[in-house]
Every structure is written in C-alpha cells, then in structure tokens.
Amino acid sequence: MKYIFGPVFSRRLGLSLGVDLVPYKVCSMDCLYCEVGKTTLKTFDRREYIPVDEVIGELKSFLSKKPPVDYVTFSGFGEPTLNSGLGKVVEFLKSEFPQIPIALLTNSSLLFRDDVIADVRDIDIILPSFDAAFEETFKKVNRPCSELSVELIKIGIRRLREETNVKIWLETLFVKGINDSDAEVKAIGNFIFEIKPERWQINTVVRPPAYDIKGLSVNELEKIKTFVGYPETEIIGKSYAERKKMPVKDIKIEILELVKRRPCPVDEIADALGLLEGEVKVALDALLKEGKAEYVFYGNKMYLKGKEHS
Ligand code: SF4
C-alpha cells in the first residue's frame, strides 16, 4: 500500500487507518515543531498531488477485509486539504463504508475556501490547528506561505463551525518562548471561546521536532488550561522528558488499557503513548511476568495482548 498506513493506535482516535493525500512534506506551512521534518514544497496551490483513484483503490481493497478500524484519518506527510480530490475520497468512504467514521487533521489554512468546506462537510471529526492569535507569533511558529495570515485561519475555522455540523477538536501546540506568553494565551483563549469546539486539545513538543525548540511541561500546560478556563480542555501532549519520569507501574497501567482493547505491537504501543520503545519493553517484561499480558503472533508480527481479567 502506498497511500494508506496502519491501522495505528492513537490516543485520540483509537485504532486509526491513516491516509496520505500529499507526498512527503508538501504543506502550506513549515512548523517549528513538525514531527515529519522540514517542508520541502511550501505551497498554497490546491491540486491532485496524489491520484485519488489510487487512494480509493487501496482503501477499497483494505477495508473490504473488514479489519478492526475505529477511524479512517486523513493525516500523514503534509497538509491533506491541499489535495483537490479530498472530497471524492470522503464521498467514496461515506457511500461504501458508512459505518467507519472519518477524521481529518488539518493546519486550517485552506478552510476559508468554498471548495474545501464542501469537501470536508461530511467528515465526522476535524482536528484543526490554531497555534497563534498574533500575526508575528503565527509567522514564527507556523512559518506559513506568504499568502496566509491569522485572519484567514480564523475565517476558515469560523466557516467550519458555522456552515457544517462536524465535530471540532481544535488543537493548539505550545512551544516554549514562542506562543506561550500570557497575552498570546489570552488571545488564543478568546478565539476558543468564540468557536466553542467540542474539545480544545492542548499539546506540546513530544517527538523530535523539525527545528531546535523546546516544549512545555505538563505543569505549564495545566496552568494554561486553568488560565483560559475553557470547560472542554484536554491536555494531550506530554514531553519525552516528562514521560521518562513516569514510574514503570504507571506505564504498565497505560499499556494494559491499550492492549486489553486490541492486540498491539511494541512500536505502536510506544507511538500511541509517546514513549521510547526501551521504556515500553521494561514495562512489558513486568506485565508478562505477572501474567497480565501475553504475546501472540499474527502474520509475521508479534503483538501484545492483555489477558482477560488482568
Ligand atoms: S502543518 Fe502539519 S505537516 Fe505542515 S509543517 Fe505544520 S505540523 Fe508539519
């Protein structure tokens, strides 16, 4: 498969089948924190970067086997809404596999456009980014195309709220010393209260970023949550540094929660929990010794499975 990947566990969406609609790092931004890498083609042009008929072919052959999938998620190597065939893929999924909800991770840059709003209106959950309320900060943290501005991002997110019924899980990723000043957080908070997303997810740098930057501690994220006071706020990012301080017993509990639901290979567990594979293995050994989990083989891969009543 060239354009679909997974399913992988994600804390937010469960077992998610990823769909890539643009080649490696084709994006309208070049965010400091990007986990994929530095943007190689920064563009604002909407076109069929990847032939969507091929994407549809891959989805059809994979989903027809009825694999356990909680979401089909447009995400991956760049900004999915740059592909002008997005709406065609959504339409295909809704007509052939209506039982599987669709999610979209987007940087919000093209939501101001009529054609993009039309393409996304049947998606179930959209996770748009909103990292800065001031123009200067926006340019620093997201390093956007010259055509983009905070105002355009706001217009797009407002359109999503006012013209569609999709659930909005708005995400703000905080970078130390860049978009975490009181004035910035206050202004971001004002926009959150205006949009009233079903969830406001606050995140920080959890994986190796494209540029040399630092994330916030959970304590600092907690302070932002309290300062803004939006009721539906979730902290979703814990930096590696903080994760490493997690005692093995806590890591064990989190792993067990995952593998009781579905068997999962070690790399996916590490990915889903934002841990290093070494950390996961230490906790896994303990779970195996305690008889709370076991390994099962499927295909040529080893999965960890939670034992019943563990
Ligand atoms: S919008 Fe997403 S893919 Fe594009 S640079 Fe930012 S984090 Fe990376």
Image (cartoon, grey):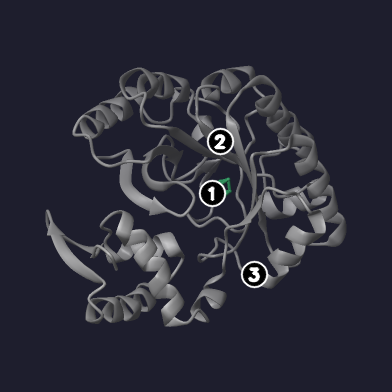
In front here: 158 or 2?
Answer: 158
Spot occupied by residue 60 in the image (x, y as percentages of width and height): 25, 27
Residue under label 1, please give it.
Answer: 39
- Kind of residue at disc 3: Val
Residue under label 2, please give it.
Answer: 126
Q: Nearer the viewer, mark 3 or mark 1?
A: 3
Spot occupied by residue 302 in the image (x, y as percentages of width and height): 18, 63
Residue under label 3, please give it.
Answer: 218
Q: Are marks 3 and 2 in contact (CB under 8 Å)?
A: no
Real-space CA distance between mark 1 and mark 2, rounded to the nearest whole angstrom: 22 Å
In front here: 203 or 14?
Answer: 14
Q: Residues within 10 Å of mark 1 (few under 14, many from 20)?
A: many
In front here: 137 or 147?
Answer: 137
Spot occupied by residue 134 in the image (x, y as percentages of width and height): 82, 47
The residue shown at (87%, 56%) is: 183
Instruction: Of the two numbered discs 3 and 1 on the same chain, state the one appearing first in sequence.
Output: 1
Q: Is residue 200 left or right of residue 238?
A: right
Instruction: Of the two numbered discs 3 and 2 on the same chain, state the one appearing first in sequence.
Output: 2
